[in-house]
Image (spheres, grey):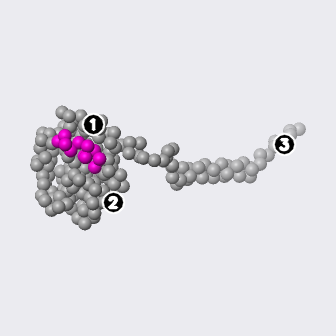
Amino acid sequence: MSHPRPVKNRSSNLSLTIVGVGLVLIGVAAYFLLPIQPKTAGAQSDQQISAIPVEVNYAAPELSLTDVKGVSASLADYRGQVVLVNLWATWCPPCKQEMPTLQSYFASHAADGFTIIAINDGDPTADAVKFVQDYRLTFPVWLDPEYTATEVAFKNMSLPSSYVLDRNGVVRLQWIGGITNAMLEKYVTPLIKE
């Protein structure tokens, strides 16, 4: 005579499976929906993530635009200086974040034959001028309502993007993304000292 096998409680197993799947889904949702807090609050300048530049070697594009004061200027006008061309827009959070760093670096190195040309990517003139005033920018800021710098000259629509030209007008470094002072000192300062 055979003994009947014990019947597993299927409803109990199904309930445990549903609870397990539910807990996994809640964990995944929490991971993606809850903000991640930094370990320490405070100054972010060199603690933030910075893009690392790519070393390149090509002639700077021919580019002429008008600055926020209505004066026409060209990249060729800056031969003999090390130039950081920064493509940015007023609506771009990483652009806003890096501007104080760029201004500080410019102020520290302008006497060494270094300049920054910040090219505004398509914003209305009034918005760009207000941005320059709000951030107290003292380096040249050019207006690019037709996206000439991004679409034609540098062929890069990512913002912010930066290009460093040596004193002979050769592009030597390019960044896509925000820049920290540490990256500027590590990569641009040696070009200024050449």
Give the quarter of the image for residue 90: bottom left
Q: Position of residue 88 (x, y in %)?
A: 28, 54
The residue closer to the viewer here, 51 or 189, is 189
The residue singled out by tag 2 in the image is 91
The residue closer to the viewer here, 123 or 110, is 110
Q: Position of residue 20 (x, y in %)?
A: 65, 48
The residue singled out by tag 3 in the image is 4
Q: Nearer the viewer, mark 1 or mark 3?
A: 1
Q: Residue at x 33, y 54 (%)?
A: 96
**How many labels were placed on the picture?**
3
**Please, what is the three-letter code of the amino acid marked with disc 1?**
Tyr
Q: Residue at x 59, y 49 (%)?
A: 27
Q: Which residues are magenta?
A: 103-113
Q: Residue at x 25, y 62 (%)?
A: 129
- Is residue 70 found left or right of 34 in the rendered image? left
Query: Does the magenta-highlighted stretch encompass residue 112?
Result: yes
**Please, what is the three-letter code of the amino acid marked with disc 3?**
Pro
The residue singled out by tag 1 in the image is 187
Q: Nearer the viewer, mark 2 or mark 1?
A: 1
Magenta stretch, main secondary structure, is helix
Q: Nearer the viewer, mark 3 or mark 2?
A: 2
**Please, what is the three-letter code of the amino acid marked with disc 2?**
Trp
Q: CA distance from mark 3 to mark 2?
A: 73 Å
- Is residue 188 found left or right of 27 in the rendered image? left
